[in-house]
Amino acid sequence: MSDDLVTFGESMLRLSPPGNERMETTGQLDVHAAGAESNTAIAAERLGAKAAWMSKLPDTPPGRRIANGIRQHDITTDVVWSEDGRPGTYYLEHAGRPRGTNVVYDRADSEFSVAAAEEFNLERIRDATAFYTTGITPALSEQMRETTVNMLSVARNAGTMVAFDVNYRRKLWSPEAARNTITRLFPAIDVLIIAAKDAEAVLDYDGEPTQLAHHLASEYEFRTVVVTRGAHGAVAIHDNVVHEQDAFETDTHDPIGSGDAFTGAFLARRLSGDDVGRALQYATATAALKRTIPGDVATVTKSEVDAIVADRTEDISR
Amino acid sequence: MSDDLVTFGESMLRLSPPGNERMETTGQLDVHAAGAESNTAIAAERLGAKAAWMSKLPDTPPGRRIANGIRQHDITTDVVWSEDGRPGTYYLEHAGRPRGTNVVYDRADSEFSVAAAEEFNLERIRDATAFYTTGITPALSEQMRETTVNMLSVARNAGTMVAFDVNYRRKLWSPEAARNTITRLFPAIDVLIIAAKDAEAVLDYDGEPTQLAHHLASEYEFRTVVVTRGAHGAVAIHDNVVHEQDAFETDTHDPIGSGDAFTGAFLARRLSGDDVGRALQYATATAALKRTIPGDVATVTKSEVDAIVADRTEDISR
Amino acid sequence: MSDDLVTFGESMLRLSPPGNERMETTGQLDVHAAGAESNTAIAAERLGAKAAWMSKLPDTPPGRRIANGIRQHDITTDVVWSEDGRPGTYYLEHAGRPRGTNVVYDRADSEFSVAAAEEFNLERIRDATAFYTTGITPALSEQMRETTVNMLSVARNAGTMVAFDVNYRRKLWSPEAARNTITRLFPAIDVLIIAAKDAEAVLDYDGEPTQLAHHLASEYEFRTVVVTRGAHGAVAIHDNVVHEQDAFETDTHDPIGSGDAFTGAFLARRLSGDDVGRALQYATATAALKRTIPGDVATVTKSEVDAIVADRTEDISR
Amino acid sequence: MSDDLVTFGESMLRLSPPGNERMETTGQLDVHAAGAESNTAIAAERLGAKAAWMSKLPDTPPGRRIANGIRQHDITTDVVWSEDGRPGTYYLEHAGRPRGTNVVYDRADSEFSVAAAEEFNLERIRDATAFYTTGITPALSEQMRETTVNMLSVARNAGTMVAFDVNYRRKLWSPEAARNTITRLFPAIDVLIIAAKDAEAVLDYDGEPTQLAHHLASEYEFRTVVVTRGAHGAVAIHDNVVHEQDAFETDTHDPIGSGDAFTGAFLARRLSGDDVGRALQYATATAALKRTIPGDVATVTKSEVDAIVADRTEDISR
Amino acid sequence: MSDDLVTFGESMLRLSPPGNERMETTGQLDVHAAGAESNTAIAAERLGAKAAWMSKLPDTPPGRRIANGIRQHDITTDVVWSEDGRPGTYYLEHAGRPRGTNVVYDRADSEFSVAAAEEFNLERIRDATAFYTTGITPALSEQMRETTVNMLSVARNAGTMVAFDVNYRRKLWSPEAARNTITRLFPAIDVLIIAAKDAEAVLDYDGEPTQLAHHLASEYEFRTVVVTRGAHGAVAIHDNVVHEQDAFETDTHDPIGSGDAFTGAFLARRLSGDDVGRALQYATATAALKRTIPGDVATVTKSEVDAIVADRTEDISR
Amino acid sequence: MSDDLVTFGESMLRLSPPGNERMETTGQLDVHAAGAESNTAIAAERLGAKAAWMSKLPDTPPGRRIANGIRQHDITTDVVWSEDGRPGTYYLEHAGRPRGTNVVYDRADSEFSVAAAEEFNLERIRDATAFYTTGITPALSEQMRETTVNMLSVARNAGTMVAFDVNYRRKLWSPEAARNTITRLFPAIDVLIIAAKDAEAVLDYDGEPTQLAHHLASEYEFRTVVVTRGAHGAVAIHDNVVHEQDAFETDTHDPIGSGDAFTGAFLARRLSGDDVGRALQYATATAALKRTIPGDVATVTKSEVDAIVADRTEDISR
Ligand SMILES: [Ca+2]
Ligand SMILES: [Ca+2]
Ligand SMILES: [Ca+2]
Ligand SMILES: [Ca+2]
Ligand SMILES: [Ca+2]
Ligand SMILES: [Ca+2]
Ligand SMILES: [Ca+2]
Ligand SMILES: [Ca+2]
Ligand SMILES: [Ca+2]
Ligand SMILES: [Ca+2]
Ligand SMILES: [Ca+2]
Ligand SMILES: [Ca+2]
Ligand code: NI
Ligand code: NI
Ligand code: NI
Ligand code: NI
Ligand code: NI
Ligand code: NI
Ligand code: NI
Ligand code: NI
Ligand code: NI
Ligand code: NI
Ligand code: NI
Ligand code: NI
Ligand code: NI
Ligand code: NI
Ligand code: NI
Ligand code: NI
Ligand code: NI
Ligand code: NI
């Protein structure tokens, strides 16, 4: 049976001091498997899609730790294993204002970053209903820029729907480099997800989100454009119709991965036949729930999201 | 020396992932001994009453863990020990909005749930000033419905004052079953505590709390009715006089057990001779303090509660 | 692609105080997913087989926790989900002499224990090369005795090789009940694994292990009989040939699951074409490695086991 | 109902880095309530005696923590509470050879150390069957030397049996000071427990344990003398009859408190009517079990000790 | 090379239950090295000064733990080591409203508290640009009152600038004792830092902060007076000019040490040549950052503080 | 004041699952700062030398964490800071037999590995009494081979005594590469430390340790050669005299760093004037103590080592 959604990208060992502790003084690190595209696949699976994640990892204890952490969430993990080498890692400290969450990447020269498209199971992409990656993938290396182009071509040529989140990371590349690369990928994309702040940073667009969505949809001929605005909700343009969705009230414990939860839920509900407005509701509710959960992953059930969408949450459920 | 307050009910092993962690992915569980009636006895003892808790447990490592956790708080634990069998347990996940606190009970077929009134030390109830149980007790099993009726009769016949908290749990029984059983217990009760939301769920009463209190007091001839309203404080009717009390501002860490803290403090101050208004102040302040404490139990001192009632709290006391 | 090995049995939430802590005083519990048959499937997969585990669990947070913990190890998990109900759980304390490891089961009335054969994906058994369960499965309930008989029939009738470990648990049933049930299962079994101490307890056989193996092989027409003897190694009879294997020196951290690691490795190597003597080596080495690992599961790689078999281990590998 | 055994002494907050960690670099400390005399009372209660512990503590968070930790074990805690002041504390690091376990006391000027005999509930001593303290108590201060003398007099005059463990601590006083004080207490004592190494350090006696016991029994007219020898077991002289007991094999996790476990079990079994030889068996088995348990306290059950005495222990009990 | 800033004061072992746990029931304590004057030195070093801390500690495991915890932060630690004795310790529980943070000191009779000025390396004070201590130091003992006077004289006589924070601790002395002692120290002081609430408690001044600063500056001839007001920011008078600074928005995790972070940053920026207004900005931003960090110490970098001052913080930096 | 001993080498973030946990399944990692040459400097400082460690690190949270972890131990840390880049890291799993301790390096392309000799404070080497590095340093990269040659030349030319431990790491380079590089360094070395197993692996010498020492001393004109043999002790040749030393009995908790502890103690005692035999005793005792301590670092005091050398250790010291 083929997949509803195949995602492609690097997942890493996320190393974070417990609670608000600082990296400089910590004696322990919490370990999570983390990566935008596996996060998205997991959220999609949990919201009802049959999801797979494709990647490359070294067959070493830290490499296997990453795969195990993702595999437990019941998605298909289609990993190319190298005999040695390093996985990407990153350090994360989090706190409230004015410190916020700080990421220090240590992902250069990972096994994934030097992988060519031919190494992966391209048949899986061709057989799937939808394919997804993000702007992080081409940001990783020259090789990955080429690989991303090739993966999108495979999907495009097979008639697999292509979804893409801009996911700009200023610690990986400059706005100019991102703009040049990503806009060249746009023609292959059907569904674009972009954070309003990334539109400003990368595309230098600081206007109204609805106008941004319109502008992008018409200029690049996307079928669907979703603009996310954090605590201000999201808007989507689909077949020229605008959908707006407020954010749900949330007490944030760990904001990382809420964008991926949003996208995974959005794609899952779309692939299940929900209309864009309904899918935006599920996306926004899943993102809110993610923010209460430590780690990158939206460990949620569809019935929990249903309760938020239906405004049936309780302070204490017993 | 006889007890001021005897409580009767099941206490369980409460198993909760640390912090905001999810049950699905946790590698550790925090362990607490927890049960409405032992929580109430502890709060009462800490607020100045001589309190005892009666229950039944298996004499196994988890069963003894429950008794030890309660006994450390310096109440009298009058436990009937069975040679084997299981104690009740429950899983608890907590988080802020929109997730909230979620309880999954695993308490069916516990040793307590099949115990008859004759197994317990009924003389202790007859000798006490007050007896207390909650609506959770008859919700546990057919046997416990009968046992609860019998325990209340023992108290009533001995002239021991009877206090009762409705404590509706929809994961244990339906509103209809609860209404049928609990209203039949009402004639034996002197002091009724009821959450406004339970009045709505079980008694289908969604009016003004003061009216609810009046209505219940007159219809069922309770001497005292206390209606609790969470962050909106509480009201009481006692001998036809209304007392109102606002909630204290609180940063909630763990909301579970705040109702029990309220009731334990209320009963302790009443048994010490405070009037209903003063007792409501202590009850509300103890509940606020409980919400800052992990676990079900109000590990507080009377002088801490005094400081809140007297508005003498400090951000940092040093 | 069909499975090399399908195992069937209950897996539970294992709750154990950290280190040598006692259940009575612990504030935390380590959580592991644990069950003889999933342990065996994981060890088999890690030693080179394509393994699947079949079971039933409630679709609740603790139920999903069990599946996640097993699924991360890359076996196929073919779980029937019930809407509610309870999973089996057990409490485990461990220590050195004279305390040892103590298990307290709380697994009665689990969803698995009341499942009928028809609820499971029997086609998977028919398609597999080998099928495996243990004496724990029929010990769980009347229903499970019937279900076990039926599962073995399905395998037998489909020509799937049947392996079985006696795995006697005196806290689940008496020696007599075990003997009656298990010996009636013997005719359906091709490969029998039995601990020497279980042979004594259940079959009342306290002679020499080699003689025991001979005796069982001839009396019940097993193709292979393996008798395990803990620190004294193991012996096997296969097609009337005796194989003996000493245990490897090991510093035990957690003995639980070492028998399952043994069996999983033995079956995997046999299914890969190794002869019985070679398979016994891998089985014994995998069991030794398991004893250094916390939890029930043999989180090992085949190359680690290769190194032990080849006597290439180092105190420090760097 | 009066107590079988009343013990008197200081209990402290024990602060120990987890595992083998060093105090210099630790970020966490494990907390235990610890004191020779409360340890002994708990062991006695668990082996069948009705035991009480008398002491003095400040009514502060650390003071209450000590009482809670002891009270959970179901003995009677008869504590005199001072409004403020400090409890005794100590730091403990443990490791195997050649480091061993190292104690750093910080117990000077504790509330207990300046308490007079009159502050305590002396009636409890008079009503009890036996009274117990150790050589640590008079080592604490001039005041405590006087208080100890007075407590022993109260017991002696009331006909309460007096038991005493020499428990020499070189970090509290010199051998000379200990000898002078303790030998002056000897006339009030019925049952003397002494470690062979303390006999050497304090009494300068380095001969054979049986001879030491004979010598002490005849010189000071003790009814019973028990000489403990760690891994070499123990000997007792009682009414001129010698009893010898080997130690049980044990994998030591935390050696602290094993002497107290020994004494508590010995006294409990003697108070239950067991003869000295049988009581020595239970004492030695309880001490062996204690060594597997973190903290000072023998969290054991009588049936666990029964199994050791009867040689019915298992590596894994399930 | 001489120091920019030398601080003098006691640092302690800070023992705090994890999270919101209560001391009464905790099984673990988090350990930090903590003391107003070492906190201040560390903040100053991190904001660009060359800072040293002078103190006295016992050369014991807990004593060395304190020095290690401070030394890691890269300041000069000039510690007089006594062979034995005790360091100061304190217990800290923290929570939100209405509980707040509660400190229980156990610091009487510490080695520091009985040290005379001559024991310290006074040459370091004479060589430094600035010297700093707080009102906690003379609060510790009669000896420390004398020592503080002498240390200030040494600084004054050498022309070293003297800074002083009133830091009133009501659990150490009465307002009257504090006023008498501290006002007698005022003539030796160039830069006074005082919390508005301490001005009220100790100096009985409850007027406007700017007026307070004026009043103190003129009455005691301070060159600089800084009045801190927690969430309401701070004001300073310097050479008769008023500077006001609002607080930055902050999500407080641990408020302890934010005053020391403020002062350390203020002094560092002043010693680097920043004007008082700019130094107040850095002080306020460093204090805000400290409140997000567990423990007493401001583990920050200057560039983090730069970002706050420049309003360049992000929710997530990646 | 100049240093007794300057060491030069890379220190890393050591990431290890707690206890015996496996990397594949762990949710936490213990963090230590670790590197042969900083380990050695710390052991030397603790045994009485004035020691400094020279290295290069990125000024990032993980880079600063490494420096902090080392600096707390009171050695001089002379670190060159790069603005960005990565520090070396490694993963470590440990267990008893047959698993042992397994290291997975992730240290390629670290900032240290590409540093040239000119970047470091060479004056410190010239001013010191002794200089030390190990065979790990030239194993890191082409650049580091050149840098090591240059550092040794600086020392040699300044008349600073040079000590060197072969420290062969097969996961960094082949025996041939190691032999070629290291034997070319030999002429610059005064004191050679070599493990017997490294002599076998690198120099292909598997004879008697005393003969090996003689052979090396005469062939390469070392003044001192120390051959270490783990649990079999060590031998040294110094000025043609042989010294032999047995190992002390030890219960190993963490074997990593025991060689560095040995060398640090040996050099410190030699630099303090002890003869080679006495220095070997201290070296062997310090190594034994290290094996009881988690992490790479010998957190010991000289008086603890004195006690081992003098055979004055106790099971419990109190
Ligand atoms: Ca699925
Ligand atoms: Ca997290
Ligand atoms: Ca009480
Ligand atoms: Ca909790
Ligand atoms: Ca596989
Ligand atoms: Ca596992
Ligand atoms: Ca009892
Ligand atoms: Ca305990
Ligand atoms: Ca510095
Ligand atoms: Ca803290
Ligand atoms: Ca030093
Ligand atoms: Ca370690
Ligand atoms: Ni977090
Ligand atoms: Ni997590
Ligand atoms: Ni996860
Ligand atoms: Ni919590
Ligand atoms: Ni708790
Ligand atoms: Ni509690
Ligand atoms: Ni374990
Ligand atoms: Ni375990
Ligand atoms: Ni585990
Ligand atoms: Ni321990
Ligand atoms: Ni403990
Ligand atoms: Ni304990
Ligand atoms: Ni905190
Ligand atoms: Ni900390
Ligand atoms: Ni710190
Ligand atoms: Ni370790
Ligand atoms: Ni460590
Ligand atoms: Ni360290």
Image (tube, coloured by chain):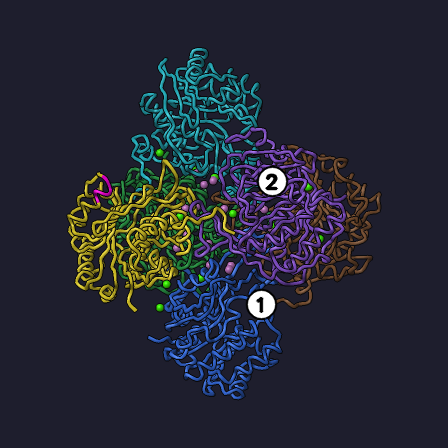
Chain colours: A yellow, B purple, C blue, D brown, E cyan, F green
Q: Which mark is residue D318?
A: 1
Residue position for label 2: B213
Q: Is residue A102 above or below residue F201?
A: above
Judging depth in this view, the residue of F207 and B207 nearest the camera is B207
| C315 within the magenta span | no
Q: Is residue D230 visible?
A: yes
**Dot 1 falls on which chain?**
D
Q: Which mark is residue D66?
A: none
Q: Position of residue A106 (x, y in %)?
A: 30, 49
Q: Position of residue C28 (x, y in %)?
A: 53, 52
Q: Is residue F153 visible?
A: no
At mark 1, the secondary structure is: loop
- Check the picture and name the quadrant holding the N terminus of chain C: bottom left
Please provide the residue range marked out in magenta. Answer: A208-212
Task: Tell me if mark 2 has few (under 14), some (14-19) or many (20+) residues whose alpha carbon lies within 10 angstroms of its own.
Answer: many
Judging depth in this view, the residue of C129 and D165 nearest the camera is C129
Instruction: Name which residue lies at 81% across and 47% down.
Output: D160
Q: Position of residue A70 (x, y in %)?
A: 36, 58
